Structure formats: structure tokens, C-alpha cells
């Protein structure tokens, strides 16, 4: 007995025109996967690099802002103070000022050439950080969630306003910059007021 010349086709097999090539199937699976991965990567990059706005600073009395000491300090400031990155200042920016921003939150602000703080007298407690003597004025009494630290042992007064909860690193990094740019000078506190 001989086999028929046209064997019957299996009803479950697709017709040759309906078969999918392996490359087409791989592309159909890989394309949505690549799209999902691309969206996740883009979201991660966008989350890490938020657009930061310029920092606006109001004017304050700074009689020595144009001094050689302030110019030297401003030119030698670091790009980062801990997790804070150097920020652009909104015009008109006061002279001898700089700011650093975190990814979220309030900036750290430095001002050079200020007058001696009225609270700084011979009885004031000082903190020494990396060889720089700082006098702290807390903003708590004024409802401000920051402290301003004054470098009081340089030829000019330098103020660093640091938001509460920012840790010690911004003050440490600023101290290194102040110490490198400005030589130490004798303290000049106000006399202790008589009661």
C-alpha cells in the first residue's frame, strides 16, 4: 500500500502564512520591556537631579563686602558644603554673598564683610571648628529655623546661616574655606555691658 501523495494536514497546525518568525516575537516582547526600563531610568535620573531655582537674598549692612579679604574668600569657596551644592544667586545679589542648596530644603548662606554682631561681647561663648572661632546666634527667638554662625577671628566678619537639622558638615567645610582664605586675627569683642 502506498501513502497518499497529499497527506492530510493536522487541523491544529497553523497555516504556513500564519506562522510568526522568532525575530518578530522577540521584538514584540523586548520593546515593551525596554520601554518600561527607560521610564524607570528616566524617573530615577529626574528624581536625583531636580531643577534648582536661584536663591534670592536681601541686602544687609556689609561695610567690608568690597574688601580684599572678602574678595579672596568668595573666589576660594568650595562647590559643595556637605550635601549642599553651590547655588546661583538671583539678581540683584548683595556683594560678597554665596549660597549652597540641598536637593530639597532651605539653603546655607554665607555673607562676608558684616559689622561685628551686637551680641558678640567679651563674655560670649565661642566654638572652634577647624581652627576658626565661631559665635552662634540662634534664630529660635525670632521664629527662624536656622542659626547664624559668625567667624570672629578673621580680618572681616563672615556669617554662615545654616538651617536647623543640616548637621555639622556645612560649618566644617565653610571653616576649612575661611581658614584657607583668611589669616587668623585677634578677637575684637564688645565690652561686657554693666548691669
Image (spheres, grey):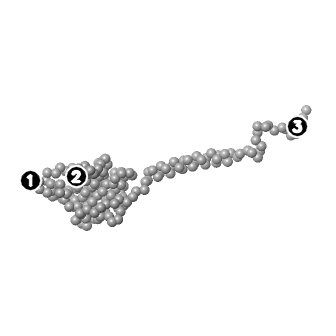
Q: Where does label 1 land, which residue? A: 194
Q: Where does label 3 land, which residue? A: 4
User: Eyeballing the image, is 112 above or below 26?
Assistant: below
Mark closer to the observer (3, 2): 2
Q: Secondary structure at mark 2?
A: strand
Spatial CA span between label 2 and label 1 = 21 Å
Q: Residue furthest front?
A: 143
Query: Of label 3 and label 1, which has the lower sequence position?
Result: 3
Which residue is at a point 77% across and 43% down the rendered structure image? 15
User: Eyeballing the image, is 44 above or below 115?
Assistant: above
Label 2 neighbourhood size at 10 Å, few (<14), some (14-19), many (20+)? some
* Spot occupied by residue 117 in the image (x, y as percentages of width and height): 19, 57
* Spot occupied by residue 51 in the image (x, y as percentages of width and height): 42, 56
* Spot occupied by residue 21 in the image (x, y as percentages of width and height): 70, 46
Q: Are marks 2 and 1 in contact (CB under 8 Å)?
A: no
Q: Which mark is residue 137?
A: 2
Whether residue 190 is visible to the viewer of this picture, yes or no, is yes
Q: Residue furthest top?
A: 1
Dividing the picture into quarters, in which one does residue 108 lie? bottom left
Spatial CA span between label 3 and label 2 = 103 Å
Residue 27 is left or right of residue 122, and the answer is: right
Q: Secondary structure at mark 3?
A: loop
Which residue is at a point 47% across and 49% down the rendered structure image? 44
Label 3 neighbourhood size at 10 Å, few (<14), some (14-19), many (20+)? few
Which residue is at a point 24% across and 58% down the rendered structure image? 158
Q: Residue furthest right?
A: 1
Mark closer to the observer (3, 1): 1
Spatial CA span between label 3 and label 1 = 124 Å
* Spot occupied by residue 53 in the image (x, y as percentages of width and height): 39, 58
User: Eyeballing the image, is 194 above or below 59?
Assistant: above
Seen from the viewer's position, the closer of residues 9 and 192 is 192
Amino acid at each position: 500500500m502506498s501513502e497518499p501523495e497529499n497527506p492530510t494536514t493536522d487541523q491544529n497546525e497553523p497555516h504556513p502564512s500564519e506562522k510568526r518568525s522568532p525575530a518578530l516575537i522577540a521584538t514584540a516582547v523586548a520593546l515593551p520591556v525596554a520601554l518600561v526600563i527607560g521610564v524607570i531610568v528616566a524617573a530615577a535620573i529626574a528624581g536625583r537631579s531636580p531643577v534648582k531655582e536661584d536663591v534670592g537674598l536681601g541686602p544687609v549692612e556689609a561695610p567690608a563686602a568690597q574688601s580684599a579679604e572678602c574678595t579672596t574668600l568668595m573666589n576660594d569657596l568650595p562647590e559643595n558644603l556637605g550635601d549642599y551644592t553651590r547655588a546661583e544667586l538671583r539678581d540683584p545679589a548683595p556683594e560678597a554673598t554665596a549660597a549652597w542648596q540641598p536637593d530639597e530644603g532651605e539653603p546655607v548662606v554665607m555673607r562676608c564683610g558684616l559689622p561685628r554682631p551686637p551680641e558678640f561681647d567679651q563674655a560670649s561663648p565661642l566654638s572652634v571648628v577647624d581652627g576658626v572661632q565661631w559665635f552662634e546666634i540662634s534664630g529660635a527667638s525670632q521664629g527662624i529655623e536656622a542659626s547664624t554662625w559668625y567667624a570672629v577671628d578673621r580680618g572681616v566678619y563672615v556669617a554662615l546661616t545654616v538651617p536647623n537639622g543640616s548637621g555639622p558638615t556645612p560649618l566644617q567645610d565653610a571653616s576649612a574655606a575661611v581658614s584657607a582664605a583668611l589669616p587668623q586675627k585677634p578677637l575684637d569683642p564688645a565690652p561686657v555691658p554693666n548691669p
